[in-house]
Amino acid sequence: MIKTKRQEVLAIITIGLAINIFLTVLKLTFGLWGNAQALISDGFNSLSDVFISIMLFVVLKLSTKKPDHDHPYGHEKYEGLAYFVLGIIFLLTATMIGYASIHSIIDYIASPQSAEPPHILTLIISCIALIIKFGLFKFYLHSGKKYDLPTIKADAKNHLLDVWATLFSVIGIGLSQLNLVIFDYLASIIIAIFILRLALQILSESISYLVDQSPDIDQVQHIHDLILSIEGVLAVDDLKVRKHMTQKYVDVEIGVKSSVTLQTAHKIAELVHHTVEEKFPEVIHCMVHVNPHRS
């Protein structure tokens, strides 16, 4: 039986969810048991991934629904909303981890002799988590490119961030074994900074999806030049291009000879419509309005 795109994406999310639950339990259990601040922070990072995967299940059902009477343009923007929520989750996670780490550093400075290094087993657990996370990142990266879904791509970026975060966790816990316990706390702060950077990036991109932001000027210019090159088009009086998640809508006013018949003007408009959608597959629809052109 051939799987549909939606079924395959659900399978991807399910794999990610299962692995993130395993990593969350592994990191938090051994982090708390072995007194490893960096591993605990990394565990909360994985916990946020669990909530993200659950949210992806919900948004996938909404965003892949076909257009209906109330949503004639489809439901894809639910995915943009989920993308925005991802950014908020990352922002809150970064704030929580950063606060706890700074508090631990202050306590360490006040009483360095009371700080105990993490158990050696936490270093081994961090190394195992690093290998698993790198494999999950490669899996999501490939899947995001294959299906061109913003939330899967965002989660792939998150998994890459997790790889770096866990790497710093390994370094921090490793240095702590040399009685340099402060590096365990510093690794936690670095993890928080990585998460904060990703949160701001995702929030910026998600807002551009939700407010119908125009693509970059080069893309708009390419569409403009193509329309102007079509036979019968004397001018591009107005051109608006807006993002619709990974796709685009185009609204254009073209100028044609004022002496042509309505039928000829309609044919030129149809040619513009079909040419733009053919040359730019990401364009969902090209709406064309015809104006009489005066030289």
Image (cartoon, helix red, strand yellow):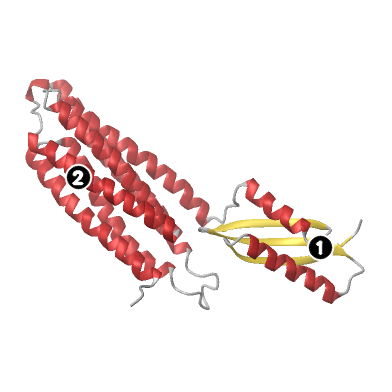
Q: Which mark is residue 265?
A: none
Q: Position of residue 241 (x, y in %)?
A: 64, 56
Residue identifier under label 1: 231
Of label 2 and label 1, which has the lower sequence position? 2
> From the viewer's perspective, is 26 left or right of 217?
left
Residue closest to the eye, 141 or 235: 141
Q: Classify 158 as above or below 115.
A: below
Label 2 sits on a secondary structure element that is: helix
**Quarter the C terminus occupies:** bottom right
The residue lying at 62 percent from left, 59 percent from top is 280
Q: Position of residue 242 (x, y in %)?
A: 60, 57
Q: Which mark is residue 129?
A: 2
Comparing marks 2 and 1, which lies closer to the viewer?
A: 1
Q: Which quarter of the picture shows residue 65?
A: bottom left
Residue closest to the eye, 87 or 172: 172
Q: Classify 183 as above or below 61.
A: above
The residue lying at 30 percent from left, 41 percent from top is 94
User: At label 1, which amino acid type do we have?
Assistant: Glu
Question: Label 2 to label 1, Cα distance in Å?
Answer: 60 Å
